[in-house]
Image (cartoon, grey):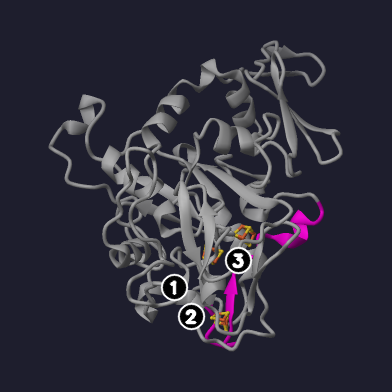
Amino acid sequence: MAKVKNWQLNREMEYPYEEKKPKKQITYVFDTNKCIACQTCTVACKTTWTSGKGEETIFFNNVETKPYGGYPQKWDVNTLKELNNQEWGKDGVYKGKTIFESESGERVTGWRPEERNYAFPNIGEDEVLGNMEKGAFFNGIHDIWMFYLARICNHCSYPGCLAACPRKAIYKREEDGIVLIDQSRCRGYKECVKACPYKKTFFNMVTRVSEKCIGCYPLIEQGEQPRCVTSCIGKIRLQGFMEDAKPPRKDNPFDMIVRIKKIALPLYPQFGTQPNVYYVPPVHVPHDFLIQMFGPNVDEAIKLYRNMKDDKELLAAFMLFGNTPRIIHSYKAEENHAVGYNEIGDEIVRVPYVEPAHNRPHWDAQFQTFRHNTP
Ligand code: SF4
Ligand code: SF4
Ligand code: F3S
């Protein structure tokens, strides 16, 4: 085992391969507070990539309701059980073991789902935690909660799937950090399915090889964001790149959101794979649940989120979500607009902080009709 630095754990950890950073790393930010679980992303991905034989239960993208939902069923609870104690020190250092540091001596600790775990993609949908008291609906804020968690492959910096494959069929692309399965090398050992703590590699029963989210690389190579991002109705997603090896750049929206302000956090960082999808935590969910799910910085992240209107640089980065299919490489917070630029510095999107309102005259003389203004 090699020693690698995991910045999400604030410490070194063991990993089967030497550290090899890609030139740039595909990165996503998802704002959980805006997700409405319409599943448009799920369907966009499914119809694009997994509509073939044997792919019926393969969802590169899924959206589940927490705390009860999960696809495959109980994916997170079962992996968390394998880790035992997951304690964070006051200094933000993770004290527990990752999936690569198990005492059992396994290369990667994991849990292998059974067929029935894939049978109910929407189990727990819209189910809240606990029972509502009679009449409590009318009291305003209440203790009953749930939220929607959109999930894809995290294109991890230290992928569990890659570490576990005995055929070395999984690789991480040097140019953008996308993690892919070479299907001509895969022999269907399913070690990747067991080892991915997020359960984002899927075994195809017909072709007898595994498949996973490909980060929509044909779009990425054209400078476009993935399908699940551009189809998102709630505009909760943004995809771009970060460069771990370099100091954060204030004009890169991902550096600003993830590394400078730390308002978006990795999902279950304690697994140790250094996932590259970052979540703004939901603001209304109990503290302990969020700490377990997103690590020790959740309180600061929520505070920043609640006060975002006073932080123009951060607000501008969030205004870019869902407003262009192109990949944004840098951005600027102007007086009244957030502006995004492509790789060569051309402007590709301009979003006003406040949507302009147009009041139309009641009588439209050109079309000889009456018009109403809808607030
Ligand atoms: Fe591999 Fe799973 Fe990480 Fe994706 S989320 S790179 S499938 S370990
Ligand atoms: Fe599907 Fe592409 Fe999104 Fe991956 S990046 S979940 S392949 S739409
Ligand atoms: Fe390897 Fe997974 Fe195929 S472990 S051989 S990529 S099924």
Within 10 Å of disc 1 (Cα), the crowding (few <14, some 14-19, many 20+) is many
Task: Indicate which disc residue 120 carries.
Answer: none
In the visual, does 14 lie left or right of 83? right
Q: CA distance from mark 1 to mark 2?
A: 9 Å
* Front residue of 187 and 136: 187
Question: In terms of sequence position, does the residue under pointer 1 or pointer 2 come before the other?
Answer: 1
- Residue 186 vs 34, above or below: the answer is below
In the visual, does 174 lie left or right of 311? right
Q: Which residue is drawn at the image coordinates 66% and 81% (left, top)?
A: 183
Dots 1 and 2: beta carbons under 8 Å?
A: yes
Q: Nearer the viewer, mark 1 or mark 2?
A: 1
Q: Which residue is drawn at the image coordinates 74% and 44% (left, top)?
A: 327
> Is residue 246 one of those drawn in magenta?
no
Under circle 2, the secondary element is helix
Q: Give the image location of residue 142, x and y in percent.
A: 23, 32
The residue segment tinted magenta is 203-222
The residue that mark 3 highlights is: 18
> Is residue 216 one of those drawn in magenta?
yes
Task: Indicate which disc residue 108 carries.
Answer: 1
The amino acid type found where label 2 is placed reads: Glu
Q: CA distance from mark 2 to mark 3?
A: 20 Å
The CB of the residue at mark 2 lies under 8 Å from ligand 3? yes
Q: Nearer the viewer, mark 1 or mark 3?
A: 3
The amino acid type found where label 3 is placed reads: Glu
The residue that mark 2 highlights is: 191
